[in-house]
Image (tube, rainbow, N blue to C red):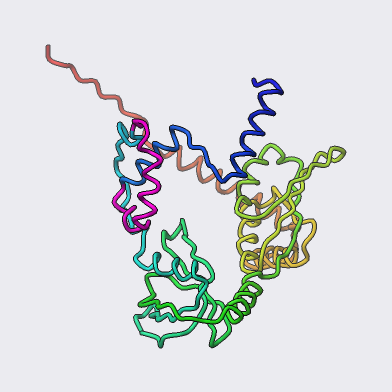
């Protein structure tokens, strides 16, 4: 454990390096960088001057390759992570200029070229595809297009004032209204807190613990498009959690319970005495049938054979 003087010195050193724009690399990080630059996709993803600058960081001393001794077996088919349109779109983003984009639909129909402003590039880890979020100048709307559906992208010059105005509009459209809700963990299931938090891991959240009642409360923040996903997680967790604050989520959960009860012909949550008696009679009949069927089964036959020796 470092003493206080070493901690102060390390903090001053890291602060000074950050001010001067110097970034330190460990041997493991340099080894990973060397392995990344040797990958065939690096030539498509990075510009030649960027690769040359990064290679200067790994030329000083001999670094062992992290991939040596590692072997991948039964791996899935690799998809193309680097798309040819990434480089020109990034160049347009850096130059802060407009673009003329032509796309095709899912059915293959070619649309007319549209003017717009690129907003950001995003890679989906689930679908393993690149998406372009851009602002359509003619319709004044936000579009999310897969790069595989883009036919061509060409840079078009726009004035700095027009670019700033369209960027502000796009930012307002992207910043969708956010909703808040409070989900309480039933005290009986406090031991499953890790599992419950894992279910809400993709949302902005804050957890607080009430020492008097010994209950956990999860404060969720989500957008309109994520509301259905929150409901899916709540239904998955079932009786482990309940919505304390959030009228919309409460209403949807009540609707879910009402539809489930209607599906099984129940008008109320509590079953009547007749239903309970019918359920008991049904279980007794099932047990009786199982016993009678087991009594009719033939007894085991043991066959002994002599091994010739």
Give the answer, above or below, for where 63 lies relative to 251.
above
Q: Quadrant of the N terminus?
A: top right
| Residue occupying the point 56% across, 43% down | 287
Q: Specify whether residue 50 is painted magenta.
A: yes
Please name whichever residue, 56 or 204, is drawn nearer the observer in this view of the structure.
56
Q: Quadrant of the C terminus?
A: top left
Question: Is 124 left or right of 55, judged from the image as shown?
Answer: right
Please name whichever residue, 105 or 181, is drawn nearer the observer in this view of the structure.
105
- Across and down, in percent, residue 153 comes to 40, 76
Outermost left residue: 309
Give the answer, above or below, for where 90 lies relative to 235.
below
Please name whichever residue, 215 or 147, is drawn nearer the observer in this view of the structure.
147
Give the answer, above or below, for where 83 lies relative to 65.
below
- Across and down, in percent, residue 166 comes to 60, 79
Exactly how many numbered labels are in the figure? 0
Give the answer, above or below, for where 238 lies relative to 4.
below
Outermost right residue: 212
Q: Specify whether residue 87 is painted magenta.
A: no
Quarter of the view holding residue 152: bottom left
Outermost front residue: 20
| Residue occupying the point 47% across, 60% down | 124
- Across and down, in percent, residue 187 comes to 76, 41
- Across and down, in percent, residue 70 comes to 32, 34
| Residue occupying the point 63% across, 79% down | 165
Q: Magenta stretch: give its range.
A: 39-64
Question: Is 265 left or right of 28, judged from the image as shown?
Answer: right
Quarter of the view holding residue 82: bottom left
Please name whichever residue, 254 or 126, is drawn nearer the observer in this view of the structure.
126
Question: Is 169 left or right of 293, judged from the image as shown?
Answer: right
């Amino acid at each position: 454990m470092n003493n206080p003087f070493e901690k102060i010195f390390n903090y001053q050193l890291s602060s000074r390096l950050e001010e001067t724009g110097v970034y330190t690399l460990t041997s493991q990080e340099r080894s990973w960088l060397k392995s990344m630059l040797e990958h065939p996709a690096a030539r498509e993803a990075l510009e030649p001057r960027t690769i040359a600058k990064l290679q200067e960081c790994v030329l000083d001393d001999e670094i062992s390759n992290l991939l040596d001794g590692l072997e991948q077996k039964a791996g899935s088919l690799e998809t193309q992570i680097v798309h040819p349109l990434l480089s020109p779109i990034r160049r347009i983003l850096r130059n802060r200029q407009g673009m003329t984009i032509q796309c095709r639909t899912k059915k293959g129909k070619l649309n007319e070229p549209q003017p717009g402003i690129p907003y950001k590039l995003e890679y989906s880890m689930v679908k393993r595809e690149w998406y372009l979020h851009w602002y359509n100048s003619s319709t004044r709307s936000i579009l999310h297009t897969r790069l595989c559906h883009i036919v061509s992208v060409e840079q078009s010059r726009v004035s700095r004032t027009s670019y700033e105005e369209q960027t502000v509009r796009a930012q307002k459209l992207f910043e969708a209204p956010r909703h808040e809700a409070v989900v309480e963990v039933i005290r009986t299931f406090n031991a499953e807190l890790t599992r419950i938090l894992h279910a809400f891991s993709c949302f902005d959240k804050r957890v607080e613990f009430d020492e008097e009642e010994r209950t956990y409360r999860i404060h969720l923040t989500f957008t309109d498009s994520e509301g259905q996903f929150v409901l899916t997680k709540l239904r998955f967790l079932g009786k482990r959690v309940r919505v304390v604050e959030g009228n919309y989520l409460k209403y949807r959960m009540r609707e879910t319970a009402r539809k489930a009860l209607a599906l099984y012909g129940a008008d109320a949550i509590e079953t009547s005495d007749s239903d309970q008696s019918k359920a008991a009679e049904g279980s007794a009949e099932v047990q009786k049938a199982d016993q009678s069927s087991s009594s009719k089964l033939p007894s085991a036959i043991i066959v002994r054979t002599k091994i010739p020796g």
